[in-house]
Structure formats: C-alpha cells, structure tokens
Image (cartoon, helix red, strand yellow):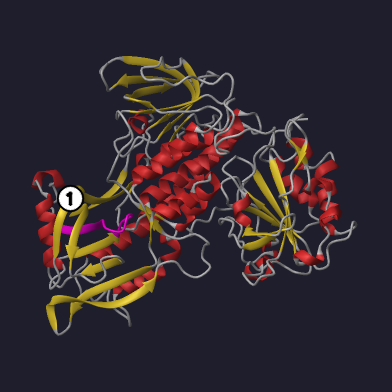
Amino acid sequence: MQYYEDGFRGGNPDRKNAAPNRREFAPNAILPEKVDVLIAGTGPAGLCLAAQLSQFPEISTMIVEPSPMNIQKGKADGINTRTMEMFQAFGFADAVKREAYWVNQTNFWMPDPENSKNIQRIGRVQDVADDSSEMPHIIVNQSRIHQWFLEVMDNSPTRMQPDYNWSVETLEVNPSLDEYPVTVTLVNTGVNKGQKKIVRANYVVGCDGARSNVRTAIGGELHGDAAHQAWGVMDILANTDFPDVRQKCLITSATEGNVLILPREGGYMFRMYVELDKLKEDERVANRKFTSDDTIAAANRIMHPYSIDVKEVVWWSVYEIGHRMTDRFDDVTDEERATRNPRVFTAGDACHTHSPKAGQGMNVSMQDTFNLGWKLVHVLTGQSDASLLHTYSKERWTEAKRLVETDHEWARIMSAPPGTSELDKGDEPRFVRAFKENLEFTGGLAVKYDESILTGAQTYQALATGEEIGRRFHSAPVLRLSDAKHMQLGHAAQADARWRIYAFAGKNDTSSSSAIHTLADWLENDSNSPVVKYTKSGADIDSVIDVRAVFQQTFYDLDYDKMPSLLIPKKGKLGIQDHEKVFCVDHKGNGDIFDMRGIDREQGCMIVVRPDQYIAHVLPLSATDELADFFSNIFVEQN
C-alpha cells in the first residue's frame, strides 16, 4: 500500500486524514436535512456502497438501518473468488483470508447401491479451478463482512457511520427538480419509535431487503415463483462420526432428502442446509412451526449411518426457496428512459431473491453496489453526465436474470430424488456434473457485460485473448520494477472510482521511440488525451485514469531511469514521485503474464479497466484516437 503522499503522519496508515467539514457522528445525533446519497440498509450491498462513497468528502452520504446495531451471527456466509478480488481493492482481503474457512474441496455423497439406507462418498471436486483466480473461495460470518466495511468507512476522510434505528418509510421523486428531488420520510425504530424525519436527497439506494420500502415506493414488484420446499439452516457446534465434516459436502439420501454441509471459520463450527418438508401451494414455511430439533432430526436421517451430536445451536432459521426479481433496478420506466435519468435505485434482495445454496446472494448484492458506486461518484463530482446512471439497471438486471435462472436449475437438481432419469443421465451423478459445469458461475466469474458506452467492441480482442472485454480483469503475477516486488497486477487497483489503463509493451519495446513511450507521452501531453481532458486542474495526473505499464523483459534487463515521466508521476501536496506504476514479467517462475493471459508479444496492447475491475476495452498501443473516442462517451471535459 502507498501512504505519506501528502506528508508524513504516524499511526495506522489505513486511517486517512479526516475531512475538515465532515459530519459529526454520535448517538442521537441530529440527522442532516439534505444529502447527496441516502442508502437504506446496512447489509452487504448497502455497506459496500457506503464504503466506496465514504472516501469522497465532497459527496454527502448517509446510510440508515432499522436495527440498533450490526448483526452478530447468522445470515449469509459464502464469499466467492470474484468478491475476494473486490475485497482486495478495499484493502481487507488478507484479513478475510486469515480469519475465514477456505473451501478447497467439495465432496459428494449419495445412497450406497448395496444398502440405500446408508450414504457413501461418490466423488470429490477441486472447488476453485487452477488459475481461475488468485483468490480462494471462503466462508465467514456475514457480520464480519459488515465489520470490515464499517472499518473502511470509519477510517475514511468522512469517518462515516450508519444511522441506526432509522428506516425508510416512503419516498417521492419530483423529476422537475435538479437538486435534491427525492423526498424521503424516515421513521425511528428505537427509543423514539415512531418519530419521523424528512430528508431530501439527490439519490436514494434501496438495499433494504426483500420487503424493501424503497422498491415499493418506486412501483417495483418481485416476480417469480416458489419451489414450495422448506429448508432448515443452522450454524452448530457438534461432534460427529461423519468423516468429511470439515469439507464442503453435498449429500443426498434415497428417501429423506438432502443436506449441504459448509464448514465455518474457527475450526469447530459448521453450517447445515437441511431439506425439510414439501409445502402445499397455499402454505408458507411459518405455518409449519419447524424447530431446530426438526432440522437436527432430519439431518441425522439423511446422513445415516452417520450421526450428529449437537452441543450448541449458534443460529438457525427456516426458509422457502424462491426465485424472484423486479423488472428494473431504478425508478425510471421504459417510457421515461429517453427523457429523464434515474434518481432511485435498488440492489441486492430488494430487486432479486434466490436460494442460499449456490452461495451467490451476498456476493451478487455487493457486486450490484460495486457497479453503482463509481458511477454515482462520477456523476456527483461532475466527471460524467447523469445519463451514465442508466447503465446500472441495464447491466445488473441482465446478471441478476442469469443468477436467478442458474440458481433455479441448481435448486431443482438439489431437491430432485436420486435416480431421476432426466437428471441422472451420463457417466456422473447430477450433483457432480452440475457442480463442475457451474464452477465459473459459483466463483462469480461468469459475469460478462454487453457492448455499450462502458464496454467496447471486440475488434482487437485477439491482442489479449485471456482478458475478455466485458469480463473482470484476470490478474496474474508480475514483478514491480522499482523494488523487485513479486505481486499480482490486479492488486494495483483500489476501490477508488478510478479507471486503469494497463499498457503491455511489445517485443523489445523499451527505447524512447517505442510504442509505450509514444503512448505515455500522448496521454500526458496531448490535448485530445483523456488524461489531459478529464483530469481537473490541480489534481494528480492519475486521479481519474491510472496508467501502468508491463514489460516483457526481466527485472535485470530494464532501466528504470529511462521510463516515461507519466509512469513516474509527481503527486500529492509535496509533489512526491510515485514509483509503483512499472512492472515486468515474473522471472522467478510464478508465471509469465503475457503467456498466461494471451497478450500479443509482438504488438503488445492496452487493456482499459473500469473502476469495478471489469475490462472496458482492448486496443493496440497506437490506437489513441479510439481511446479518446471511447472515453468521450463517459466523461465530461474538465479543462
């Protein structure tokens, strides 16, 4: 990490200097009358958005939550590799890796053909495919994810904290107003229960769950179906003779249903998702009055001849599988889309719900607001026109639809009895086959944004075959030239709303007349350069677009003092040089990024990466006109 840019300061380097005019947070503090962004709900989606916006003191943000404090246990627990890559950008991936359970293997158990009352292990699959990500698939308490985001917020220049005991009751949008057009009525849920407060906002984001008041206020409805199948879920401390209790397991019995076992952090606790009873068409899970003992008994029946002796039930719940989503994720109808820009958004369970067993809910919810956050920053800081915000609903609705459809099929496979002819065709049982086919999806790596103003055409995709336009930037090992540090190139990115241009040099491309030098000089000095046009006067040269270069030569074959000045820029109040923008191939055998990601060695290329880590474009190093045209559709000229 980098710090001291604006001078020396002691203490925790994660704790940034406090903004002088920040809002003071305190118990029972007076709520603001007006804010730029009001976020409803401190679940993963809401906190992911708040953590991003908290870094910008010029943007006033508040996040409200009806509960009196952060949750302590229960709810979601699975974090896929894509989300771990996002956590790296926020700076707490290493803390998560240290504390969490790593899912390395997934085991499959089915009825023993010799004695169908018993289960037996029928297969094992590596949970994260080789080189699919540098990150693990992990399991950790959702409350800890909240806490890491809360720490990011508290360490930010705004020192942001949630306003607990407040809930969005309703809201109204007045499209004729240019400023603060959303009038929000908040209601107190704490000691002053029932007290109301009016707050006006430029934008509102509903991360307030499946019963979202924000969604209701903008006329959104969840559409879909229910499987009419009750499942119990519990986190337990227990003893068992089941041999794979510390590995992820999918278990199906002949007649008693299914169990999913997920080991939890800490080495002792584990979670079970246990199939209970079918529900009638008009029946809800609450009508059956299931208890934790019902879930334990069902698990013991399914896992015979093994048994579980529960010592403590840490948390438990019952639920019914449902697959639902709204028609849009903002307040603009199809008829209005050409005439006005969105002011209200929904994210996470407020606009899509699904079963927990595929482990996608919390992950996709955070990816929703990771997509939205930088777009709000661009608009509220004057970098982009507000029409940019239309891309949120368009991009995330498509991905939510993919999630719901895939999860619906996975839930059907999980709940079908063994021997179902349609599902059990082929050489492998349905569990194993479906799991292997969905590894990219369950890792969060199947997202691919369509061509748009934010995602370029595939014209030059052949220059980087392993970095597909529209998908997330796939990191690989490099060596930082200034200090010979081995690292992942993708870890250069932070959750700071900046774009990245990774310039990969062609063969022998090191001279002062090379393509890399020519590109760097153009980016730094030409009036048509997006760096020149869209960086505000007096701001650091990389404050909008962060340019980095990767060379094919080894550390010993490159001269750092001959690098272009754009790659050793002077920044901050003191004008201090940044020495962390030039990389070369890893010469210690950890992998050659050019080979691993299909980078054209002869020509090299530019890979343009969005602030949410998705690849926006692949271009030749000489394609300065195309680069300028691409950014002209996103940014507003500053100078």
Instruction: From the top left corner, tell me how far across and down residue 585 is, in percent.
Output: 70, 65
To which residue does mark 1 refer? 313
> Is residue 272 a member of the stretch shown in magenta?
yes
**Residue 13, above or below 476:** above
Q: Can the viewer see residue 57? A: yes
Which sits in the foreground, 549 or 456? Answer: 549
Which sits in the foreground, 401 or 90? Answer: 90
- In magenta, the rendered stretch is 263-277
Residue sticking out furthest to the bottom: 114
| Magenta stretch: helix, strand or loop mostly | strand
Please state which amino acid type lies under the numbered disc 1.
Answer: Val
Instruction: From the top left corner, tell me how far across and down residue 171 is, in percent.
Output: 38, 23
Q: Is residue 273 left or right of residue 470?
A: left
Element class at badge 1: strand
Choose top left, top right, bottom left or bottom right for residue 185: top left
Instruction: From the top left corner, tell me how far across and down residue 579 is, in percent.
Output: 74, 48
Q: Can the viewer see residue 335? A: no
Q: Is residue 112 left or right of residue 533?
A: left
